Image (spheres, coloured by chain):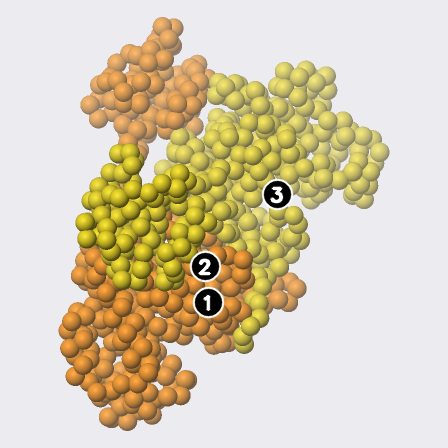
Chain colours: A yellow, B orange
Amino acid sequence: MSGRNFPLPRGMRDIWMEEMAQRTWINKKILEVFDRYGFQLVEPSPIESLETLEAKCGSAVRDEIYWFEDKAGRKLGLRFDLTVGLARMVSNRPDLALPIKLGAISNMWRYDEPQHGRYRCFYQWDAEIFGSVEPEADAEIISLSMDVLENIGLKTFEVKISNRKLVEGFLEEIEIKDLDRIEAVLRIIDKYRKISKEEFTEELKKLGLDKTQIEKIFMFISIGGTSEEFTKKISEISWRNIKIEKGLEELGRLFDDLKSFKKAGKCILDMSIVRGIGYYDGIVFEIYDKAGEEIGAIVAGGRYDGLCKIFGRDLPATGVAGGIERLMLSMMKANLLPSLEKPMRVFVVAVNQAVREKVLEVVGKLRSWGIPTEFDLRTRSLTKQLEYADKFGFPVTLIVGTRELEKGKVRIRDMKKREEKEVEIERLRDILSGHVNL
Amino acid sequence: MSGRNFPLPRGMRDIWMEEMAQRTWINKKILEVFDRYGFQLVEPSPIESLETLEAKCGSAVRDEIYWFEDKAGRKLGLRFDLTVGLARMVSNRPDLALPIKLGAISNMWRYDEPQHGRYRCFYQWDAEIFGSVEPEADAEIISLSMDVLENIGLKTFEVKISNRKLVEGFLEEIEIKDLDRIEAVLRIIDKYRKISKEEFTEELKKLGLDKTQIEKIFMFISIGGTSEEFTKKISEISWRNIKIEKGLEELGRLFDDLKSFKKAGKCILDMSIVRGIGYYDGIVFEIYDKAGEEIGAIVAGGRYDGLCKIFGRDLPATGVAGGIERLMLSMMKANLLPSLEKPMRVFVVAVNQAVREKVLEVVGKLRSWGIPTEFDLRTRSLTKQLEYADKFGFPVTLIVGTRELEKGKVRIRDMKKREEKEVEIERLRDILSGHVNL
């Protein structure tokens, strides 16, 4: 039972202090933006009934998530995103006034193959608006997403926008009308950036699409650019049906709104953006870091007016999620991860064992003033204590000795300048709060 | 597939915005104290190998936790506390300089019977010191715990302290020496507050204890009081062995340290405190809210020098955990849960649909100044928009109308005073930041 290691299960990891401090900082920056937009933080249950997780995507989802039976034989699953939980929460609360804006920052689990920077437990920030059909709500979501990135200091991103109605309308035009077939094609288009052109063609062929259909898909997903460029290109194409018209109208209003928000500059239209997840049915978007496209989308979202209906309530919705781990990869590339040194930390040193209780008194006093203070917990020698304080970067040490104590004083040491001075204990508060120079 | 509810599994719950805002505030207050004491925040993996969770407590733990097999047949479990994960983390990192102080605030899962205020997923704050055998480390942990409670405003608590060595030394004196028997008796003593005297006696009898042994246990667990009262009572008792002597010495030094920290006033000795969990082996303590003893211990901890050894590293350790839900019950009783109204939130109202894009411009501008700003996402009438802003307690609305816009102005409305005034859009920043009176 002793002497051996207990490793973590495959794909799992701990978060250590340096990374945790960075995450705390990132969360604070995200919450600042949530506040500015009126999103309120909630936390959906991490464990759901399996049938809730299957409600939209069917039992195929079992292959991709952690699910199990509890001791009473109930089928449970760990959440795979925050959107499903938030939609279930709001659907069960008809008393809430609408529209409602909810946010969450938390972890989730997927039984994926672990890869570099990809774990089986990971974190997302998430923001959703329930109860508005207007493109203004989509504009809110996209604008918020951009402000989240800008608030953490990222500037090199690009928002790629499309509309599921438009894509589905186009697929109808090329005679792909069956729902299963539409979803299968969308899943392949969603992989367009990750696989080669040959693989892409091959996968479409496997679905039974003919050469003309595949050519038209290539043509369609290449449509994009600024809203002006897009309008020009799309006007040259003759396909029109109700879904296409509706999709174009929504995109037009969305871009008007983004212009009013002064956010259109970093937004382009890109028909290859469809989102793989089944529940989207309107405007969809992904944000890429132009300095690190290989990281994949760092933010993604869209409208899913149909999801809440499954949970018993006919409620339009639009939202966004961003992976914290991917965001941190982008931030690392751009050298944006903050170093989070504490400005003032004091280490109180005991000259000998006789003054240890006095050291604790000084420590207690400093802490009661709100000053981060530590002392030796290993009865080490004076030299060893100073070495420790130096190694851990304490800018200031207080040296408690018998002679100075008799005068109600301690020695204060500036660890960088290597200067010492005697001061009265009662003056420490002013000195250490930075109000008075040493 | 539509129109029905998807309830949460038994014992699970969502956290809604009001409670989440309170939790965010509580976490901030806890982290302030962590900072003051030099504890660094980490997050151990929520999923562990089942054998890690079983390492100390044996396979009996399976009955009390969520565990399952993943798709590759690995036995996994959801963590039941943060201590085990932190101990495993530190044990696997011999490169870390010691002592190290780690903290965590997160959720965990236990397959308990759900009760009032008790769920199968709950939150704890947790602080641990690894690498110090000194009672100063225990004093740090107790002092930190008291500061955590005081920092959230709780004043009516009492810290009850004992020592596992002392209790085990006493049990040896009454001829309870077998490890399994000792642990069985400790588990019964741990329930002393929760069951009747008759049930307590009955459970000890079932273990095969005779009348004299049971009487002596009643006598022993009634020993307590201030350190002076305790010293007097314990000196009247003749039992002495190595464990008792060691336990008394540790408690003596602990109280000296607590006095130096000016924390002894709320600390008493209480031999009925033993902690149910198997891994404790030195000083143990529980903190109760004197205004709500029925809530149970709101904080509990102790020394567990043997736990890390199981994870492959001989590392002394002492720590503490407090349940967030119980803490919130105590805070509710004492009316300490803060109301977290935002001081400034602005709702921008459109007089008609023609000015909606202008509304978005104003909203975007205010947000870029860091002012929380919202607008109507449902194309409602002017009256309905004002009603909504009133209902949701926005202190200020801005009314955007065609005539005012022509002059570069909007109407600003103080929702409480029901006063309106025309102002230039560019002056809004100063007015809404509170720098200039309306």
**Residue sitting at 58 percent across and 23 percent down?**
A266
Residue B178 horizontal/vertical position (percent): 40, 88
User: What residue did someone put label 1 on?
Assistant: B315
**Residue A297 at least partly seen:** yes
Q: What type is the residue that disc 3 sits on?
A: Ile
Disc 2 marks a residue whose amino acid type is Leu
Distance between mark 2 and mark 1 Cα atoms: 10 Å
In the visual, does A280 lie left or right of B25? right
Is residue B410 shown above or below A93?
Answer: above
Q: Which residue is mark 3?
A: A277
Tags 2 and 1 in contact by the CB under 8 Å rule? yes
Q: Nearer the viewer, residue B236 or A199?
A: B236
Q: Chain of mark 1?
A: B
- Mark-to-mark CA distance, 1 and 3: 47 Å
Q: Are marks 1 and 3 on the same chain?
A: no
For discs 2 and 3, the disc positioned in front in the rendered view:
2
Question: Judging from the image, what secondary structure is the residue with disc 1 in?
Answer: loop
Q: Quadrant of the N terminus of chain A?
A: bottom right
Q: CA distance from mark 2 to mark 3?
A: 47 Å
Image x and y of residue A420, in percent: 33, 43
Q: Nearer the viewer, residue B435 or B384?
A: B435
As drawn, the label of residue B98 is: 2
The kind of residue on which mark 1 rests is: Leu
Q: Position of residue A2 (x, y in %)?
A: 54, 75
Q: Is residue A158 left or right of residue A175?
A: left
